[in-house]
Amino acid sequence: MQKNKTWYITTPIYYPSANLHIGHAYTTIAADAMARFHRLCGDDVLFVTGSDEHGQKIAQKAAEALRTPKDFVDEIVGFIQDPLWKTLGISYDRFIRTTDADHIEVVQRVFKQLMDQGDIYKGTYEGWYCLPDESFWTESKLVDGKCPDCGRPVERVRQESYFFAMGRYQQRMKEYILAHPDFIQPPSRRNEMLSFLDSGLEDLSISRSSLSWGIRVPGDPQHVIYVWFDALLNYLTAAGYSSPNGQFERIWPPDVQLVGKEIVRFHTIIWPIILMALNLELPERVFGHGWLLIGETKMSKSLGNAVDPLELVEKYGVDAIRYYLLREVPFGSDGNYTEESLRLRINVDLANDLGNLLSRTTAMINRFADGQVPFLSAPCRDIDCVLPNLAAQVYDDVKNAMHRLLISDAITQIYRLIRAANKYIEDRSPWKLAKDPKSRPELNTVLYNLAETLRVVSVLLSPFLITTPEKIRNQLGITEPVRSYREALFGQLRGGEKIERGEPLFPRIEESSTPDNENSRDRNTLGRNPRETMGPMTSSSDPKEERPIGEIGIEDFQKIDLRVGTIREAEIIASADRLLKLTVFDGERERIIVSGIRAHYEPQELVGHQVVLVANLKPVKLRGIMSEGMLLAGSAGDILSLIAPARTLAEGARVK
Ligand code: ME8
């Protein structure tokens, strides 16, 4: 029987010029989550990552370290595989190195084929070269005399070179992009590439004679093949292009190629044109995700602002880091990295919402049901259907989000279920039901629903987190690992499982337990506008934040125009990780309020909610947006809650 097509996903292959940072981990963890999700769905997955080892930049770094290039890369690549990817739980099927024998064979074979068919010719290259990006530029494409991609200085190059005749494919490439709306994602990158194509496509210099660290041009050993031409072909090698035994046909083309936005051009113009020339199918989707920023600047090896993933794992644990990277930034947008926002995610989402749900549920089953999950019984009231119904919706929503590569949306959906379960505890107050023996069936239903929701959550979270799902299951007395996404359907817990309470899933990070956090905070929140660290108006229970306030008269209080409003829209501000842009209707008009509540609320959960706003606050510009007012919120420790009227009121109602 013919096997199904392999689901093939790739990351860029990284330069082993220095240790990798959390930007590289971000792409790789995202690909890992997708690979794990597809494996759970029963797909035959091929997940490839690797290292891009040739080229001038590596040769130079090796020379500076007084090592041969191969020695130099061997050490860094060894480190990337273990401990880096191993610690982060990267479940790749192949780690490809461009120094691997099968890859060298593929590159030389492709070069020769394209040469034989006239797509490669010899000429003289004169132009500019950006060393950090290893990219060629003509004079007209430079911006202020610098590399248009990264803004760094370029060097003049003049040498005999082989050229790839890309220009002749310009029209075909454009037609392909137009006919395949899903090929380049997200759509903004697609538009950028279309205008790049419109600005004209020159033939590409694909060999260097001034360098020896690379794959030799077949039949002309004076030349080595350009590092990007070599690197892009890794995706063919890893799919088995060198050994035609039917395997390649089953794998090709890639289903998803994840790349950072700065290399979308290589992957959606040069790479597909090579494939067109080889008469091979193009990848289904190339997704150009955004950057992790430190302040306003991209985190990068060469800028010296890199954060080491292993240090973070040591401090906070692997699942906290995976969760933060996958959840914090909507996939596709840029996002600021700060250690402060990482700690908030741990305390609020992981320790509070998820960890407490597990510990409250297991404690109540111990106390009210002799430590055994009660058996499933018919729902007692409508409210007992809330979790099963929501779980069914979330099952579909997570699946849809993952098929659209929207990882942080998928996790947000899972959190709808987690938060609903916490609310269900409050709504059903099992401790009250336990007081009346007649309420036993109701109590059992409630406890079963909570345990089952946690089991479902353990399945849903398992592409994203690698140790937590098992810990949840162990505490619920489930011994089997998660095997299939279908296990996330509600109602499969048998009942009778023995609770094994354990350590808290995520211990809260107290300020004092991170003695160096002041330093790291300084390091990681560079360039922030100090106004943006301002939260909404809060009443704080944190003694550090309490300021003595003298008495005021009623006339002082009356100066504040407090009104009820409804949030109509809520959006993330790409360049500000703590802020949300809210459109609030105040009874008369819609006003924009920029509020520092991003770490506490997802935009979509706010829409439709009533709030109390300070209507006569002088407008202020935050991140270029005029903010006209402020929302009231209260906070206790890390929990922050917007203040809303206890009953719905007409918008514009005075609060006094
Ligand atoms: O470009 N934020 O390798 P590279 C998010 N060898 N992602 C980031 C990031 C950041 N601040 N910094 C790096 C190369 N990345 C080539 C690729 S592929 C045939 C050849 C991630 O070591 C992101 O995926 O410079 C980016 O595209 C990649 O690392 C660049 O890694």
Image (tube, rainbow, N blue to C red):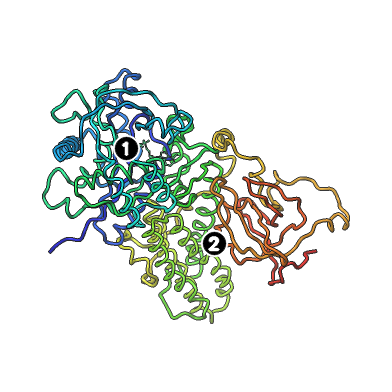
Image height of 348 relative to 107, above or below: below
Label 2 or label 1, whichever comes before in sequence order: 1
Quadrant of the rendered image holding ligand 1: top left
Q: Secondary structure at mark 2?
A: helix
Residue behind mark 1: 202
Disc number lying in front (2 or 1): 1
Quadrant where the C terminus is found in the figure = bottom right
Q: Give whichever of 461, 471 is nearer the camera.
A: 461
Residue 169 visible? The answer is yes
Residue nearest the viewer, comparing 32 with 424: 32
- Tell me what residue is drawn at x 55 percent, y 53 percent: 572
> Which three-letter amino acid code belongs to the residue tagged 1?
Glu
> What mark, if any, has residue 408 been given in the picture?
none
Please give the name of the residue rendered at 47% of the width and 29% of the height, measured from the top-left corner: 304
The foreground one among 474 and 628 is 628
- For the point 22% across and 33% down, the residue is 99
Q: Residues within 10 Å of mark 2 (few under 14, many from 20)?
A: few
In the shown orientation, is residue 169 left or right of residue 417? Answer: left
Does dot 1 land on a helix, a strand or a loop? Answer: loop
Few, some or many residues within 10 Å of mark 1 (<14, 14–19, 20+): some
Residue 255: image location, x then y, percent: 29, 54
Seen in the picture, residue 62 relative to 620 is either above or below; the reply is: above
Task: Say whether mark 2 is within 8 Å of ligand 1.
Answer: no
Q: Quadrant of residue 486?
A: bottom left
Using the image, determine if residue 85 lies above or below residue 5: above
Residue 604: give its label.
Answer: 2
Residue 381 in the image, given as x and y percentages of width and height = 52, 80
Q: CA distance from mark 2 to mark 1?
A: 45 Å
Instruction: Name which residue type carries label 2.
Output: Gln
